[in-house]
Image (spheres, helix red, strand yellow):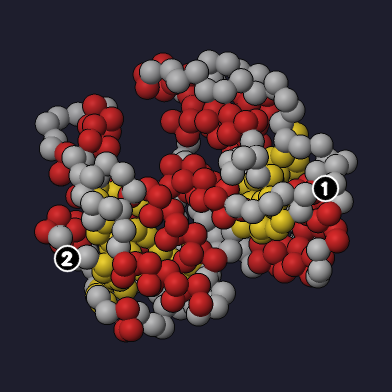
């Protein structure tokens, strides 16, 4: 159990209650002055954030700028989590995943489900309450959720892997895709790993039907899903078997493409049965114009915050390339690919 470093941005009573309840029994230092938020390497860092009606916290923005401008190792070997309180129903998830992105690019690891968020009404806990036995208030559920986040941050460990099994999921044409070409450069430097690739072809994965919770839970008991197909026959077993998931994600209109989105949505049935706290995920993202950070944010939400995959430091390799073959013309691209592979290999014992 490590001592916690709390970076506090806000003074609301509810954020105070969230911290008071979740920090009981832990040793912690709290900082409210950005100028004192230094020496963030090898720490257990908890961001505690208030968002006001406009969804903006100026001090948080200044801190993210400080993290970015302080270099790629400002939070090296640290573990992070977030408690966030909003005055309304908006902005909390967006600001949380942006904070995770900045800290992660500076070397901070985030365990699965590193976020507890309080929307203005706390109605974001209604679904959880509906499947919880007994009478529990929404605020009590929030406080328990905050405590779980702090426990993950305080007790999370980086598990070293031997000959790790890597699963790469991709949807594009391997002969013309810049994203796949960049992955090829990366995997050339992953000789100590066992690599499996699954091509998600057009039409091979039907998107999630949105089954009721009990129906989804029923299928999950047999590691199944309403639609079956390649997800149940190939992807589910490969996910369960892998140590590291690599998502190859070209930018489609500032979003991951439909096939990869369907894969993530369909993971819900597997997630009902098996959590992914012990699995790492990385991504290779290529944009034709700009916006790779938006794809990274989306993946952070879907796989780290929602589906419990661990987010290792500097999880995304992001480049800009439009026409087929353009990625290979980027200056020092093979060195960048090798550096990304070496980052993955830090997990190997």
Graded by Cα atoms within 10 Å as few (under 14), some (14 to 19) or many (20 or more), the crowding at tag 2 reads few
Across and down, in percent, residue 16 comes to 15, 61
Across and down, in percent, residue 290 comes to 64, 53
Circle number at residue 323: 1
- Residue at 77% over, 58% down: 186
Across and down, in percent, residue 64 comes to 42, 69
Q: Quadrant of the C terminus?
A: bottom right
Q: In the rendered image, is residue 144 in sight?
A: no
Alpha carbons under labels 1 and 2: distance apart: 50 Å
Q: Is residue 24 above or below residue 278?
A: below
Is 48 on the left or on the right of 70, as rendered? left
Q: Nearer the viewer, mark 1 or mark 2?
A: 1
- Residue at 57% over, 23% down: 207
Q: In the rendered image, is residue 137 in sight?
A: yes
Label located before the other in sequence (1 or 2): 2
Tell me the element at label 1: loop
Is 191 on the left or on the right of 295, as rendered? right
Across and down, in percent, residue 259 comes to 65, 30
- Residue at 58% over, 41% down: 255
Graded by Cα atoms within 10 Å as few (under 14), some (14 to 19) or many (20 or more), the crowding at tag 1 reads few
- Residue at 81% over, 37% down: 173
Residue that label 2 marks: 11
Is 335 on the left or on the right of 311, as rendered? right
Tell me the element at label 2: loop
> Picture quarter containing residue 79?
bottom left
């Amino acid at each position: 159990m490590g001592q916690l470093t709390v970076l506090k941005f806000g003074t609301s009573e509810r954020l105070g209650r969230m911290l008071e309840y979740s920090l009981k029994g832990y040793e912690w230092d709290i900082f409210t002055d950005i100028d004192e938020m230094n020496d963030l390497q090898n720490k257990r860092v908890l961001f505690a954030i208030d968002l006001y009606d406009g969804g903006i916290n100026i001090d948080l923005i200044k801190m993210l700028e400080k993290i970015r401008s302080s270099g790629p190792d400002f939070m090296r070997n640290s573990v992070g989590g977030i408690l966030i309180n909003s005055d309304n129903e908006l902005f909390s998830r967006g600001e949380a995943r942006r904070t995770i992105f900045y800290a992660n690019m500076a070397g901070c690891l985030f365990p699965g489900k590193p976020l507890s968020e309080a929307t203005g009404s706390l109605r974001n806990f209604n679904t959880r309450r509906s499947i919880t036995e007994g009478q529990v208030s929404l605020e009590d559920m929030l406080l328990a959720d905050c405590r779980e986040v702090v426990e993950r941050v305080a007790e999370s460990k980086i598990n070293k892997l031997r000959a790790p099994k890597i699963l790469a999921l991709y949807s594009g044409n391997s002969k013309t895709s810049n994203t796949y070409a960049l992955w090829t450069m990366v995997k050339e430097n992953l000789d100590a790993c066992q690599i499996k690739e699954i091509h998600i072809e057009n039409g091979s994965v039907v998107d999630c039907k949105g089954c009721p919770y009990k129906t989804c839970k029923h299928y999950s008991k047999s590691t199944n899903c309403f639609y079956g197909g390649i997800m149940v026959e190939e992807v589910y077993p490969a996910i369960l078997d892998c140590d590291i998931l690599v998502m190859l994600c070209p930018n489609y209109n500032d979003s991951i493409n439909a096939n990869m989105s369907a894969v993530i949505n369909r993971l819900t049935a597997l997630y009902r049965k098996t959590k992914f706290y012990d699995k790492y995920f990385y991504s290779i993202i290529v944009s034709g114009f700009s916006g790779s950070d938006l794809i990274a944010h989306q993946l952070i939400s879907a796989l780290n915050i929602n589906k419990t995959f661990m987010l290792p430091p500097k999880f995304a390799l992001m480049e800009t390339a439009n026409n087929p073959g353009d990625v290979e013309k980027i200056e020092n691209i093979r060195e960048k690919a090798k550096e990304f592979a070496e980052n993955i290999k830090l997990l190997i014992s």
